[in-house]
């Protein structure tokens, strides 16, 4: 994609601190890290998110993630990390090229997990589960 920032990084048109590369996947430091070592892992093939990525690009990326994550935490000297992907603008996705964040974590780093809430009652929980169950497409062929 001509105007995609991460495609430009993949194509080496824009510099980045690359920490891992193979023929399908690239990993580089986030320019505005949540914590030191915050790394972005991207498939080289352009897609907007896991909504439209090819199965092979997704598999290649997911297979590479644990190895890259082990290197990230070991390299910065911590043991834990958050792994995530913002899918869609409302979820905070700013760059429309599939990517996964590896965010190194340690005790006392001051970062907070997402705030959680409760269902109003058991029926709201069950109705929600039902709606989702019915909406998940199942290939019955
Ligand atoms: P998103 O919000 O789409 O999930 O994450 C995009 C990430 O890309 C952000 O954390 C942001 O800091 C990072 N980012 C934006 N522009 C650049 C850039 O030019 N180079 C690098 N290395 N990271 C970038
Ligand atoms: Zn792209």
Image (cartoon, rainbow, N blue to C red):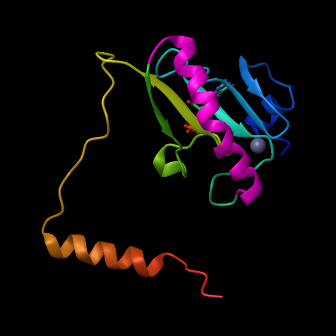
**Along the line of sight, which residue is nearer the eye, 2 or 47?**
47
16 or 72, nearer to the observer: 72
Q: Closest to the observer: 88 or 51?
A: 51
Q: Tell whether position 80 is magenta.
A: no
21 to the left or right of 100 = right
- 7 relative to 38 in the view: left or right: right
Magenta stretch, overall SS: helix
- Relative to 105, residue 76 above or below: above
In terms of image quadrants, where is residue 107?
Answer: top left
**Residue sitting at the far bottom:** 141
> Bounds of the magenta span?
53-78
Residue 41's spot in the image, x, y percent?
65, 34
**Is residue 32 in view from this perspective?**
no
Q: Is residue 108 shown to the viewer in this render?
A: yes
Task: Give the x, y percent position of residue 34.
Answer: 47, 22
Q: Quadrant of the C terminus?
A: bottom right
In this view, 52 is above or below 126 = above
> Residue 30: percent from the left, percent from the top?
60, 23
Above or below 24: residue 21 = above
Q: Quadrant of residue 16?
A: top right
30 relative to 10, above or below:
above
**In percent of the image, x 52 and y 20: which residue is there?**
73
């Amino acid at each position: 994609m001509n105007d995609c920032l991460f495609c430009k990084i993949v194509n080496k048109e824009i510099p980045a601190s690359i920490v891992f590369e193979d023929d399908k996947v690239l990993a580089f430091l986030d320019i505005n890290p949540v914590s030191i070592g915050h790394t972005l892992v991207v498939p080289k093939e352009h897609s907007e998110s896991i909504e439209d990525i090819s199965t092979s690009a997704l598999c290649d990326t997911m297979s590479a993630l644990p190895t890259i994550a082990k290197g990230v935490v070991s390299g910065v000297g911590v043991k834990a990390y958050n792994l995530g992907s913002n899918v869609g603008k409302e979820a905070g996705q700013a760059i429309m090229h599939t990517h996964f964040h590896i965010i190194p974590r340690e005790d006392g780093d001051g970062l907070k997990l997402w705030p959680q809430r409760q269902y109003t009652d058991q029926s709201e929980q069950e109705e929600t589960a039902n709606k989702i169950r019915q909406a998940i497409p199942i290939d019955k062929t």
